[in-house]
Amino acid sequence: MAQLTLDKLNKRYGETAQVIKGIDLQVNSGEFVVIVGPSGCGKSTLLRMIAGLEDISGGDMYIDGTRVNDDTPSERGIGMVFQSYALYPHMTVYENMAFGLQLAKLPKAEIARRVEESARILQLEPLLQRRPKDLSGGQRQRVAIGRAIAREPKLFLFDEPLSNLDAALRVQMRMEIAALHRRLKSTIIYVTHDQVEAMTLAQRIVVLNRGNVEQVGSPLELYDHPANEFVAQFIGSPKMNLMPGTLLRAGAEESIVQLWSGKELAIPVATPAADQGRPVKLGIRPEHIEWGEVADAPNLADVLFVEHMGNETYHYLDNAGRGDPWVVRNPRRSTVTAGETVGYRLPAEHCHLFAETGEAYPRLRVGASDAEPGQAAPIVFSERVRANAAH
Amino acid sequence: MKLTRKQREAGAKFWIYFAALVVTVICVFPFYNAVLTSLRTGQELFLPNYLPSGFHWENYVNALGENGVGRSLLNSFLVATVTVGICLLVSITAAFSLARVRFRGRKYILFTILCVSMFPQVAVLSGMFELVRFLGLYDSIGSLILSYTTFSLPFTVWVLTTFMRSLPVELEEAAIVDGASLWVIITRVFAPIMGPSLVTTGLLAFIGAWNEFMFALTFIISNDHRTVPVAIGMLQGASQYELPWGHIMAASVVVTIPIIALVLIFQKRIVSGLTAGAVKG
Amino acid sequence: MTHNSQGLLPASGPALAGTTAGPRAAPRKRSLQQRRARAAWLLVAPALLLLFAVAGWPLVRTLFYSFTDAAMDTPDEYNFVGLANYLDFANGERFGVLADPLWWQAVGNTLWFTACSVSLELVFGMLLALLMNQKFRGQGLVRAAILVPWAIPTIVTAKMWGWMFHDQYGVVNDLLTRAGLIDGALAWIAEPTLSMWAVVIADVWKTVPFMALMLLAALQMIPTDLYEAARVDGANAWQRFRRITLPLIMPAMIVALIFRVMDALRVFDLIYVLTSNSEATISISGYARERMVSFQEMGAGSAASVLVFMMVAGIAACFLWINRFSHEGKEARQ
């Protein structure tokens, strides 16, 4: 399995449109890296540059130490799975998987061995003589994967392979792809716009925005320590809540932030002295906001509306007109209705702080519940229980 | 009195059917008239009559026979088939490159091809005449195959280019990832699925070649080598003032039936081919 | 303040050991796009060569012959006469194609024919397309029926209509008389004004189906909910046509129009067979060919051919220029 290195890679269309703006990246052998970002961020372009389907305007690309800028895809030894599967309609499943091997002039016996092995791994054996039009979406996707596997490539590239599948099938294919990675121990580069796929499949995530890398890290690193506002709001659903405030007192161990409401909050975030007095933004994820009795809570807000999901409830709080309503996630059913006033608390250890530029100040301590993202914050009080709102 | 919705709809429907009827009659009548005429002889010809008044087949026997158009049918078929065959072969690779590969000068080539398809035939007539004589092809079918390429080739390239554009990009990319060269992509990936487009293009080009008149009139002088349009155009009677219309109509019907049959059988393809070139072009 | 979690390129490290010594020396290759571009040229070449041989070369030769006084039966013997075939002054008289009143008659005929034919074809084609866009039983039959005029070879069309326009026995005169629209038989083919109309009618009959199919394809691309929204807004049928249909099919209509005008300018077959190139109907292509083949004047005929080419090319250039002009105007206004 191969190692991929990108050195100041950039891509320009014509004179003006710079789609990829100088990317540095190293993917280690056997790693599963997911490139994720909003539409138009350049992730597909980046993948196609790695594949060799798009020319590289500047910078270098190395596979296992060899510079491959001018190599064709097959010379680079990559296998690619396309969003719309791209199966040859006039060939059977077997022929689809064998095509690349025939072009490489491999001996017939070897071709047969590889195709049958791939078919076995993906449970395609009974389908080998069928044509693509006789297959279901999930089956076609597996044939597309099988075609890539049969080539025994150094690098596997996936271009949004699950977008064309329905929700249930997507979950199933996700598991299959993860299992495939464990089994083949291959280097995989996977592009998607769906951050759930990124969080569940990746060993490392590359967050791309308008041609720039925002952050590279493991899923949990991105969740706990987003490098900037963009990553913070891109990862995690629903989005992280952001509130404007001012940095009252900077510090290397603790910073004091004054929210627009006047309330002050001391959070374990390191800020430089020079930023004291500057506007900042406080961020906290919906699952971390705690709430409690109106009487004791340090903050009050009106509930705008409530979404009952069955297993959890989202409450949208009015933040006095300063931007989007905040979302609070309650892992249980709730009897709170729109129009009510609730009290809430912002636990310091779950707070993030962002500078004017959007960059995040380093967090020194993370809340215990951060260890398992996606799960309910264990400290949630019911509306009737008094909260210990000490801050 | 305001009409109810149902009445308005019924009125509209009536006008639609009426218009459809008028259109159908107008389109088919001239041919119908020709068929009627072809089945008459002698004095019957001179009485306008809108229903068949007897079935005289002599005109048809005459039409296909010695002085008739039987031989010309064969000539036309030969010329059209060979011309279209050559043009298609050469066009496939050119159309693929023009449609799907970005290279310098592509726009100019496409523009040139469009321009050539706009040439008035007469503009190349004397030059072509010289060429035909030079190659010793005067009065032979070869002269037509050569000269028909002038307009058939730009046509087939243009229409095939439009078809090629509509083939899925990801299929080509998958083939590239599999290590296929341009040639392999054309022959092993796209050619098998281009069957319908090739048939359509070939049909349209065939009809165009079949119909050609000026070159056939100028380069062929012996009866044996005439093509259909010239044979029909040349039909005359014994004297200058007598025109055997029955005979002429029979010959016309004979040469038209195969084409009409072709067009009706392949009408969906033909319509899509015609419109693809223009609407997207 | 970015977090450096193995994402960025380390300044030094085992991973790059291979590269610091320089990448494995591979010869400088062409990229994929460059290789494809090269292959594409090779694949286009045969078509281009063939095109040059059968279209480019003869065109050049025609131009060449237009400057000579060659004759068709002895094309090898000729003298250069410069522009004499086009226009010449000698003995106080004007010679050459441009001095020939028949040439100008042909130009007038052709332009008149083009203007009439194309406008009629546009109007009828539009009506027919609108009809075909409706849903009714027997739609398939009508669609097949309108392909008949298009399918029939032009020569056969000429003969058929020639028969129908026959002054004594033709159905046109018969029907018109029965309908009481005319008193005596009209000499459609013989009389100058009428013969031009005969040609126009035959051409319109043959070409309206093609026009209708083009326009129908464009019509079918308009989403039906646009019409429904317009009805909700209170627009009647004419308003819907003028404000929604017409603007949306304009691009396709213009393309079809340009193609038809180009075709109409080059008309030859129909006129040659229907009216035998009579003076009242002869087209510019007909004139050129007559000079060349009937009078065996290869030089003068070639000159006329070149003039025909220039006329068609000139009008095409006008279209392109207008097109570009209107595009730039639109961009400037935006």
Image (cartoon, coloured by chain):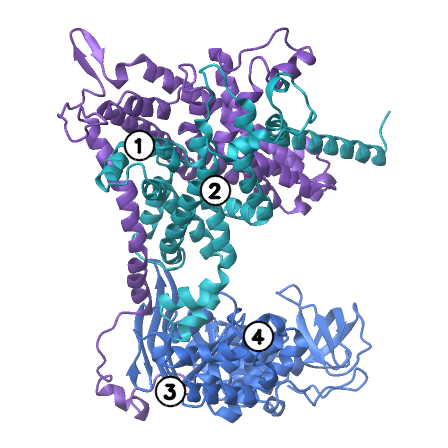
Chain colours: A blue, B cyan, C purple
Provide the residue designation for mark 2: B207
Q: Amino acid at mark 4?
A: Asp
* Residue occupying the point 55% across, 45% down: B262
Asked if badge 1 and badge 3 are on a common chain, one would say no
Q: Nearer the viewer, mark 1 or mark 4?
A: 1
Asked if badge 3 and badge 4 are on a common chain, one would say yes
Label 1 marks a residue whose chain is B
Question: Residue C110 is drawn in which quadrant?
Answer: top left
Provide the residue designation for mark 4: A194
Q: Nearer the viewer, mark 2 or mark 4?
A: 2
Where is residue B187 shown, x and y percent of the image?
A: 41, 65
Near mark 1 (Cα within 10 A), the count class, few <14, some 14-19 or many ≥20, is many
Label 4 marks a residue whose chain is A
Label 2 vs label 3: CA separation?
59 Å
Where is residue C28 shown, x and y percent of the image?
A: 22, 74
**Residue B238 shows in the view:** yes
Q: Which mark is residue A3?
A: 3
Q: Amino acid at mark 1?
A: Ala
Label 2 marks a residue whose chain is B
Query: Is label 1 in contact with label 3 (beta carbons under 8 Å)?
Result: no
Query: Is label 2 in contact with label 3 (beta carbons under 8 Å)?
Result: no
Provide the residue designation for mark 1: B123
Where is residue C73 shown, x and y percent of the image?
A: 22, 27
